[in-house]
Image: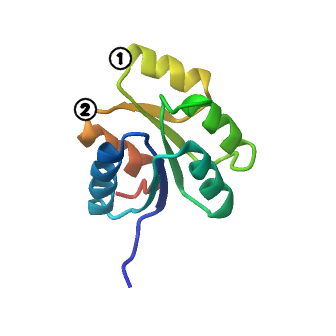
Amino acid sequence: MTSHRGRILLVQTNADFLRTLIIRLEREGFEVVGTTNPLSGFTLARQAGFDLYFLDLSLPGTGGAGLAEMIRGFAETTPILYISSEGVANQARMAAACQVEGCVHISDLDTLAQTVHALVDPAV
């Protein structure tokens, strides 16, 4: 049986990038459940306990901010992290406005891994 550092729900609309992120996070020792569908992401979030919600900021419909707000309705203390192609200044503003723990740029997978570890597995 494999020991995981934490469970992550990843909601990312780009299927290829979703696979890339899942592979990267699994290599870091996390159990990752991923979906490209925001509604499925919300359903999964309600059904299973996760240690981190990792959301595409530009999800269709309510966007990542809307999904984060819905998740906060039942997971008040679980960290939420955005992934975005927005500039750094806009990322910080969006994260603060939406009351999430942070926002990582899609091109910076090293920072992504470090941020996820800091939120889910701070002992690493």
Q: Which residue is drawn at 51% across and 33% down?
A: 59
Residue placed furthest toward the right: 73
Residue placed furthest toward the top: 89
Residue 89 position in % (x across, y down): 40, 14
Q: Which of 84 and 14 is in front in this view?
A: 14
Q: In this view, does 50 lie to the left or right of 76?
A: left
Q: Is mark 2 on a helix, strand or loop?
A: loop
State the colouring used for the structure image. rainbow
The quadrant holding residue 1 is bottom left
Q: Earlier in the sequence, mark 1 or mark 2?
A: 1
Q: Which residue is drawn at 25% across and 34% down?
A: 108
Question: Given the image, on which type of amino acid does mark 2 rest?
Answer: Ser
* CB under 8 Å between discs 1 and 2: no
Q: Residue at x 35, y 46 (%)?
A: 15
The quadrant holding residue 45 is bottom right
Q: Which of 14 and 115 is in front in this view?
A: 14
Measure how far apart labels 1 and 2 are at the Cα level: 11 Å
Q: Is mark 1 on a helix, strand or loop?
A: loop
> Where does the C terminus fall, quadrant-wise?
bottom left
Residue matched to label 1:
87
Residue 10 position in % (x across, y down): 46, 49
